[in-house]
Amino acid sequence: MAIQIAPSVLAADFARLADEAAAVADVADWLHVDVMDGHFVPNLTIGLPVVAALLKHAALPLDCHLMIADPDRWAPEYASAGARNVTVHAEASAAPVRTLRMIRSAGARAGLAVNPGTAVEPYADLLPEIDMLLVMTVEPGFGGQSFLDLVLPKLRRARHLIARHGSEVWLQVDGGVTGETIGRCAEAGADMFVAGTAVFGAEEPAAAVEQLRAAAEAAGRHPWPEAIE
Ligand code: DX5
Ligand code: ZN
C-alpha cells in the first residue's frame, strides 16, 4: 500500500472546518476526525452532527477515529452517515466483531485502534474483520503530545502480524507524527499517517503534508509485506 497522509482536524480551527479541510484537499488522502466523548478520554470534541455537516463540505474521505466509551452504539451511525473509514478502540468495544461487521455492512472501511499500553497480539484473529489497524503513538485524548518511541517495537510486530495474515490491512499511526518522527514509523511498517499539529499548526498546511509524505517515502520499506525480512 502506498503512503497515505491523513491530516487531523483536531489541530484545525473548528470554527472554519470547511476552509481548513479545503486547504489540504489537493494533497492529502484522508481527513482524520477525532471524536471524543469526555469518558473514554478526558477531552470532548465533536460528534455525529458536526461530522455529518463536514461530510457535505469536505472533498476528502473522512477517517473517523472514535475515542468514545460506547463505540458499539455509535460506530455504525458514522458509517451510515458517509464516513469512509470508522475506527473503534479495542479497549472500548464490548463486541468488536459485531461492530466491525456493522461498519462494513454500512459501506465503510473498519478500523481497530489500540492504545500505547495495549498489545496487538490478542487481536490477531480479528485481522479478517478489519481494513485498518491503528497503533496509537500517544495516549489518546489530546493533540500536540510527544511521540512515544516505546510503541515502535509493537508497530513492527503489528506489521509482521499483517504480513503473516497476508491481508491488505493498512497500518496507521496517530499522535506526535512530525517530520522528525514519521520516518521511524514508516521504517517500522506504518503506511498511513495521521498528523494534526504538524499539518494545521504549520504556516502552510498543504506544504506540510507534502513534506511529511516525502519523509515517509524516503524512510519506508514499501511495498509491504514483501520487504519484510
Ligand atoms: C489524539 C488524536 C490525534 C491527534 C493527533 O488523541 O487521536 O488524532 O489529532 O494530534 P498530533 O498530530 O498533534 O499529535
Ligand atoms: Zn486520532
Image: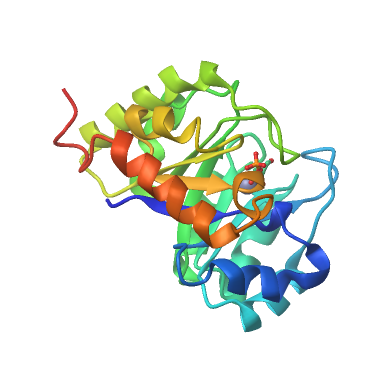
**In the picture, residue 127 is in which quadrant?**
top left
Confirm whether residue 100 shows in the render.
Answer: no
Q: Residue at x 79, y 64 (%)?
A: 14
Residue 19 % position (x, y): 69, 74
The coloring applied to the image is rainbow
> Given the current orientation, which residue lies at the most extreme bottom position?
56
Residue 63 vs 128, above or below: the answer is: below
- Name which residue lies at 64% across and 81% down: 57
Residue at x 67%, y 58% (from the top left corner):
9
Task: Please state if 120 lies on the left or on the right of 58 as rendered.
Answer: left
| Residue at x 63%, y 59% (from the top left corner) | 75
Question: Where residue 21 sits in the image (x, y, percent)?
Answer: 62, 69
Give above or below for 177 relative to 228.
below
Q: Nearer the viewer, residue 153 or 130?
A: 153
Query: Which quarter of the rendering shows the C terminus?
Result: top left
* Front residue of 117 and 16: 16
Looking at the image, residue 218 sits to the left or right of residue 197; the answer is left
Q: Is residue 144 above or below residue 148?
A: below
Quadrant of the rendered image containing residue 96: top right
In the rendered image, which quarter is residue 203 located in?
bottom right
Residue 12 in view: yes
Q: Position of residue 188 (x, y in %)?
A: 35, 27
Query: Looking at the image, which is closer to me, 183 or 223?
Result: 183
Quarter of the rendered image showing ligand 1: top right
**On the rendered structure, is 33 left or right of 1?**
right
Q: Position of residue 135 (x, y in %)?
A: 50, 34
Total numbered labels placed on residues in the image: 0
